[in-house]
Amino acid sequence: MNKIIVFACVLFSAFSTKAQQKVIQLYNGTAPGSENWTYNEQVYKPGTKDALVYNVSHPTLTVYPADPSKATGTAVIVCPGGGFYILAIVHEGTDVAHWLNQKGVIVFILKYRLGHSLTDNPGQELTDNMEKSDFVEKISPIIPLCIADGRVAIQYVRAHAAEYGINPEKIGIMGFSAGGTVAASTAFNYTPANRPDFVAPIYAFIPPSMQGTVAADAPPLFVAAATDDNLGLTSQSVALYSKWLAAKKLCEMHIYEKGGHGFGMHKQNIPTDTWIDRFGDWLGLLGYIKAK
């Protein structure tokens, strides 16, 4: 009987948490620049736990509330990656959100606009497309829309800070791979309304051609990647960090020997498993969460 009661409590808690995850439409009506997109968001669930979100044409924010007993007033917008065609919504999304929630951080997972997947196996479709010579040409018109979604997300969270118990000067954004493009790009050419208070691109696609001028009030930067990144993006992370360093702005970088591309919250029993702890240390150092 006791086991049944415990199970019921856990189940109720899970349902309660899920019920609190409010989904916010980022735009009123269709998103500017994609008015003719007619496809709708779908979820692909392979044999593993890592679901993939694809065919996003109406970007949203999903709210993951902080642990009330630990709430710090800090918010982080999390942008999963996936080559601008899919979102690795678990190990680069919800797993990150749950970790930050326990640190007192409210999380908004951003489902930014994605290119149209034509099959019911979007992961394999993306892999196949990335091997084609015209892949960069195909994603080029999509990237500015993704970045625009990131800027609007920051602006929304700041405008509604009081509603969520957020300090409007403690709103950061982090992203992985393509999501890192979204996050890192918001650190350039911002306005007071959409300026991030800190930025964390993780193994981001952010070539020098996309890196603008570091502003006088540039936000603190946290960078992480692996030397053996199989997409060869590590040098881009180093270049981004170097710009902040040269401008004498707050920055921290962790480049791991092994980990590959897309390690996220996956456990591989190597040092990349602890990158999120280093991110937490950094947030504590800057006063965004309680330092250890």
Image: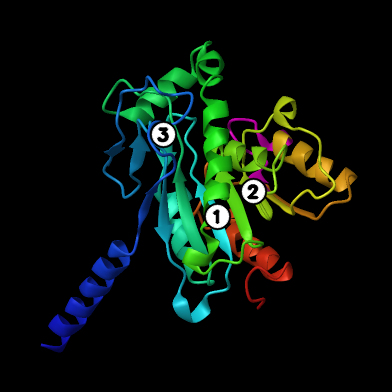
N-terminal label among 1 and 2 = 1
Tell me the SS state at disc 2: loop
Q: Badges 1 and 2: C-beta atoms under 8 Å apart?
A: yes
Residue 23 spot, x, y in % from top left = 36, 52
Tell me the SS state at disc 3: strand
Does residue 256 appear to the left or right of 76 in the view shown? right
Tell me the SS state at disc 1: helix
Name the disc covering residue 86, or none: 3
Rounded to the nearest angstrom, the CA distance separating label 3 from label 1 is: 28 Å
Task: Name the kind of residue labelled 3 in the image.
Answer: Ile
Task: Name the kind of residue labelled 2 in the image.
Answer: Ala
Task: Name the kind of residue labelled 1 in the image.
Answer: Ala
Rendering quarter of residue 282: bottom right
Looking at the image, is mark 3 or mark 1 nearer the viewer?
Answer: 1
- The residue range painted magenta reads 224-235
Does residue 82 appear to the left or right of 256 in the view shown? left
The residue lying at 80 percent from left, 55 percent from top is 250
Q: Residues within 10 Å of mark 1 (few under 14, many from 20)?
A: few
Quadrant containing the N terminus in the rendered view: bottom left
N-terminal label among 2 and 3 = 3
Residue 197 spot, x, y in % from top left = 68, 55
The residue lying at 75 percent from left, 29 percent from top is 208
Residue at mark 2? 193
Does residue 102 appear to the left or right of 168 in the view shown? left
Residue 202 spot, x, y in % from top left = 61, 46
Rounded to the nearest angstrom, the CA distance separating label 1 from label 2 is: 8 Å
Residue at mark 1? 159
Instruction: Give the colouring mode of the picture.
Output: rainbow
Residue 19 spot, x, y in % from top left = 28, 63
